[in-house]
Amino acid sequence: MSMTLHDFLLAKRDARLSELAPVLAALAQACRRISTAVRCAAFTGQTGLAGSGNVQGEEQKKLDVLANRLMAEALHACPQVRAFASEEDEDSTPGSHAANPDGVLVAFDPLDGSSNLDINGPVGSIFSIQPGPPGDTVGTADFLQPGRQQLAAGYALYGPATVLVVGSVAGVHAFTLDEARGEFLLSQSGLQIAPDCSEFAINAAYQRHWHAPVTRYVGECLAGRDGPRGKDFNMRWMAAMVADVHRILQRGGVFLYPADQRASARQGKLRLLYEAAPMALLVHAAGGLASSGHEPILDILPASLHERVPVLLGARHEIERLNDYHRQA
Ligand code: AHM
Ligand code: MG
């Protein structure tokens, strides 16, 4: 029988993850409850807009608000969590054990890709676990750490199956929710991303706004076997970063949400602390790369909690190529 997440952490297969067992258990519990909320929304009155906006001026769906509450409840109850920060809240929130000297910080996006909810498309939750500051007080400024310092990261994908993926620098593992038992069971260990690929993901609706390096890269992919790449590429875009990253961890490829010339995307769209950095940790641990085009995402020191960043991630050789195109431009 497959190993539960609990037994995996108990077995110390990855010492870094095992040290975080209480936090990962809290996150797994929240993701299990969010999974149920997403699946049952049509008959629990949880469809549609909440009638409120979040700190970034985005309209919140009822499920955005509910997922945020479920995450907050689970993390608040966890003695290993000193503070947490969410895409949906302006500032961080202290945990019930804010002075715990061994405690950690958790930044999360409770429901990523929530525009997919209207069409029963995939959505997910993303989380980043960082070391806590020295001393016994904690605040929003303590979250402003480069991604390299993350202790662990992960996401839950609410797709045909609910899958929880967790990783540290030592490796990335996937656990599938057995809904009957209410347990996450180990389904894949040591996920790897091949260095080459022939599949890319980008929202082509913004093509006219792209900068030259991205236009060049995508143009060369589209030119297929007759172009400079000498092979055909496939395109897939899930409209939920979690689902695109999961595909890349399963069968390779690259995902691009670059900066472009729209006023809203000068720094890209995705948020550094709770979207880009955790995914970058997982992608690097699986042998891929994650870049802004100019530097590794893991090296960027955030200036604010909700800072945005251009994201190019996936197959190592493709991201190196994109970095070259940015240098040449
Ligand atoms: P969200 O956190 O508000 O859901 O936004 C993030 C999502 C990503 O999951 C996805 O890759 C991207 O936004 C899609 O953006 P766009 O609609 O511009 O293509
Ligand atoms: Mg998001």
Image (tube, grey):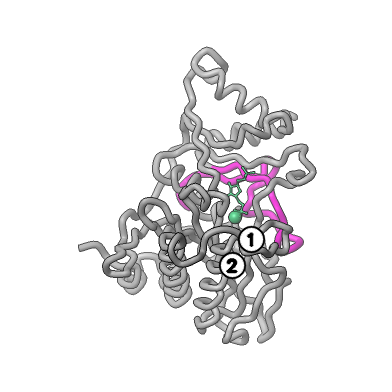
The N terminus: image quadrant? bottom left
- Residue matched to label 2: 65
Image side of residue 71 versus residue 210, left or right: left
At a point 52% along the width and 80% down the height, the residue shown is: 80
Residues under labels 1 and 2: Cα distance?
7 Å
Q: Is residue 63 magenta?
A: no
Above or below residue 133? Residue 322 is above
Image side of residue 208 versus residue 35, left or right: right
Task: Please state the quadrant of the image where ligand 2 appears.
Answer: bottom right
- State the image coordinates of residue 151 (x, y, percent, origin top left): 53, 66
Residue 253 in sight here = yes
Which residues fall within the magenta stretch? 284-313
- State the image coordinates of residue 220 (x, y, percent, origin top left): 59, 22
First in sequence: mark 1 vs mark 2: 1
Q: The disc labelled 2 sits on which kind of residue?
A: Val
Q: Are marks 1 and 2 in contact (CB under 8 Å)?
A: yes
- Residue matched to label 1: 60
At a point 62% along the width and 27% down the height, the residue shown is: 217
- Number of marks in the image? 2
Q: The disc labelled 1 sits on which kind of residue?
A: Gln
Q: Is residue 295 magenta?
A: yes
